[in-house]
Image (cartoon, rainbow, N blue to C red):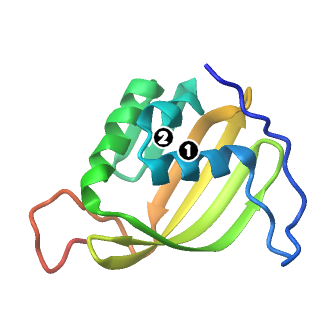
Amino acid sequence: MSVIDTAPTDTAPTGFPQLHPVFAKQIECLMKGDMDALMEIYHPEAESLRFQGSSKGRDGIRELLAKYEGLNMEFVEVNEYVHSDDMIMTRTTLRVKGEEVVAFGAYVIKDGLIWRVFGCDEGGVRDWWADDRSDRR
């Protein structure tokens, strides 16, 4: 297992804070589609909580993230972002199945790895895996 240097960085010349190294690594792994590298940044006791339920451990989180692969998700922009040594909070615009969605996420870092993750879409819970319907809320 690789250990990531999680010392937060200063702000970029634009005034927008640079990403926490763990969050930057997560984005890199997702963009490359490297699920094995992605799982290395999750703590063995990690837990992800969403309104649809929780996923526990690396296997549970791997299963949850694998479901997202078929949604044709595209990153649009980071709307808001803040981090400390052991916490990250972000509001990001994504395109999911062609629809722009603003998502909120919060992370707790333990031992340099993602230990807890909380996330949701603004505007209500959606079942992206349900049959195509005009109203997915």
Q: Is residue 51 left or right of residue 28?
A: left
Nearer the observer, 32 or 42? 32
Relative to 120, say whether 95 is above or below. below
Residue under label 1, please give it. 117
Residue 11 position within the rendered picture, expressed as x and y whole percent measured from the top left: 87, 66
70 in relation to 21, above or below = below
Q: Please name the residue that numbered disc 2 is placed on.
A: 48
Q: Which residue appears at 55% of the width and 44% of the height?
A: 117
How packed mark 1 is, by other alpha carbons closer than 10 Å (few <14, some 14-19, many 20 or more), is many
Q: Is residue 16 left or right of residue 22?
A: right
Is residue 73 shown left or right of residue 42? Answer: left
Label 2 to label 1: alpha-carbon separation: 5 Å
Q: Which x, y percent locates residue 107?
A: 63, 47
55 vs 33, nearest the viewer: 33
Task: Please state, as top left, top right, bottom left or bottom right, where the N terminus lies in the image.
Answer: top right
The secondary structure type at the circle numbered 2 is strand
Quadrant assignment, res 92:
bottom right
- How would you rate the neighbour count of disc 2 (Cα within 10 Å): few for under 14, some for 14-19, many for 20 or more? many
* Quadrant in which residue 59 is drawn: top left
Question: How many numbered discs, if any?
Answer: 2
Residue type at the position of mark 2: Ser
Relative side of 109 to 114, left or right: right
Residue located 32% across and 35% down the image:
63
Amino acid residing under circle 1: Val
Dots 2, 1 in contact, CB < 8 A: yes
Question: In the rendering, at what x and y percent does residue 22 appear?
Answer: 68, 43
Quadrant of the rendering where the C terminus is positioned: bottom left
